[in-house]
Image (spheres, helix red, strand yellow):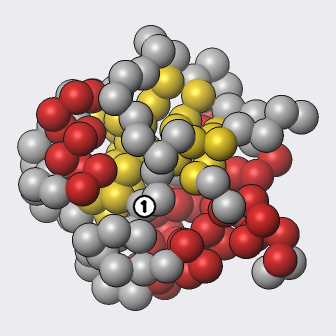
Amino acid sequence: MTLRVTPEYITSLKPNEIFVFGSNLAGMHGGGAAHIAHKLFGAEWGVGVGPTGQCYAIPTMQGGVETIRPYVDEFYAKQHLELLFRVTRIGCGIAGFTNEEIAPLFKAAVAMENVSLPNGWREIIGQQE
């Protein structure tokens, strides 16, 4: 299996790539990766969960890590093997979480060849197993 790592800065996507970003439930994409998603990749204003434009929104601003988990569990990459999901450091910017808090939520994605994770997340997940 090829390990896929999401670049720190994404300014373009191939047609089969999806920008996975942290949002808020209201879909107000005013800052961070959400702003990039809206500005560059068609994330729709008012859509805070799921597919939007060439993106996938996972809300991270509504509470603790336990409130993010259900949205990561619903993340639909396994149903769309034809797409490459570029997971950004969701929740690790404006929302204030650490890589060590968020990375384990993506444990199931480690084995998925159509998901790229931020640099260091695979190692964090492996250390917490």
Instruction: Locate residue 28, reporting x and y percent.
Output: 11, 56
Foreground of the two, 116 or 80: 116
- Indicate left or right for 117 with 51 as reference: right
Name the residue rendered at 22%, 29% in the picture.
40
- In the figure, residue 95 lies in which quadrant? bottom left
Amino acid, disc 1: Ile
Quadrant of the snapshot with the N terminus? top right
Quadrant assignment for the C terminus: bottom right
Number of marks in picture: 1
User: Is residue 113 rendered to the left or right of residue 58?
Assistant: right
Numbered disc 1: secondary structure = loop
Q: Position of residue 115 (x, y in %)?
A: 64, 39
- The relative height of residue 11 versus residue 73 in the rendered view (above or below) is above
Residue 51 at what x, y percent from top left? 35, 38
Q: Is residue 115 visible?
A: yes
Q: Residues within 10 Å of mark 1 (few under 14, many from 20)?
A: many
Note whether residue 49 is visible.
no
Residue at position x 83%, y 77% from top?
Answer: 127
The extreme top residue here reads 15
- Name the residue rendered at 37%, 50% in the picture: 21
Q: Residue at x 37, y 22 (%)?
A: 12
Q: Nearer the viewer, residue 40 or 71?
A: 40
User: Left of 26 or right of it: where is 82?
Assistant: right
Furthest residue to the front? 8
Q: Is residue 68 above or below residue 66?
A: above
Residue 121 to residue 63: above or below = above
Circle 1 residue:
90
Pick the front one: 10 or 75 = 10
